[in-house]
Image (cartoon, rainbow, N blue to C red):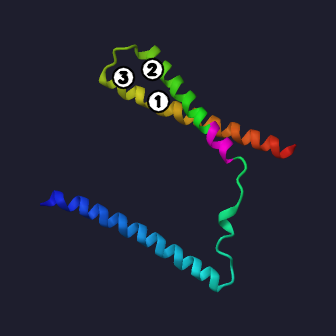
Amino acid sequence: MGEALIPISLFLGAFAMVFGIRYLSNKEKMAMIERGIDPGVGKSTPRPYLSLKFGLLLVGLGIGLLVALFTVRSVFGPDMTHAEEDQSAAIYFGCLGIFGGLGLITSFLIEKKAIEL
């Protein structure tokens, strides 16, 4: 009996969340219109370097995965114990964070250099 309530409550919760977000967004736009503010102003700001940022982030994450793979294979070898698998997960997450961050820093430096020109 209890298992049947989980999908029903999940569906109702998701519906209530979407309805609430739309309702509050509409109320906010109506309040902005009453005050004489255009509600579409903040949504159309151009972001010229957004694709560069995401591209370099994904390249950094890919390089991080490759470095982590080669590191785990060279340190632990093909036969890993359970404790070594936990350590290899830490290596994967660490490399993803480091190289993803390096991709974002590279994106920032390219944007900064382009703005100065």
Question: Which residue is painted at 70% across and 60% down in the image?
Answer: 45
- For label 3, count other residues whose C-alpha is less than 10 Å away and answer few (under 14), some (14-19) or many (20+): some
- For label 1, count other residues whose C-alpha is less than 10 Å away and answer few (under 14), some (14-19) or many (20+): some
**Among numbered discs 3 and 1, the one appearing first in the sequence:** 3
* Quadrant of the frame with the N terminus: bottom left
Please give the residue where the numbered disc 2 appears in the rendered image: 72
- Marks 3/1 in contact by CB < 8 Å: the verdict is no
Name the secondary structure under disc 2.
Answer: helix
* Count of numbered tags: 3
Say if the magenta span includes residue 42: no
Distance from the alpha carbon under mark 3 to that under mark 2: 9 Å
- Marks 1/2 in contact by CB < 8 Å: the verdict is yes
The rendered magenta stretch, by its main secondary structure, is classed as helix
Residue 23's x, y, as percent? 47, 75
Tell me the amino acid under the disc marked 1.
Tyr
Question: Which residue is painted at 69% across and 83% down in the image?
Answer: 36
Name the secondary structure under disc 3.
Answer: helix
**Among numbered discs 3 and 2, the one appearing first in the sequence:** 2
Specify the farthest residue to the left: 1
Say if the magenta span includes residue 52: yes
Tell me the amino acid under the disc marked 3.
Glu
**16 vs 87: above or below:** below
Distance from the alpha carbon under mark 1 to that under mark 2: 8 Å
Name the secondary structure under disc 1.
Answer: helix
Numbered badge on residue 92: 1
Distance from the alpha carbon under mark 3 to that under mark 1: 12 Å
Front position among marks 3 and 2: 2
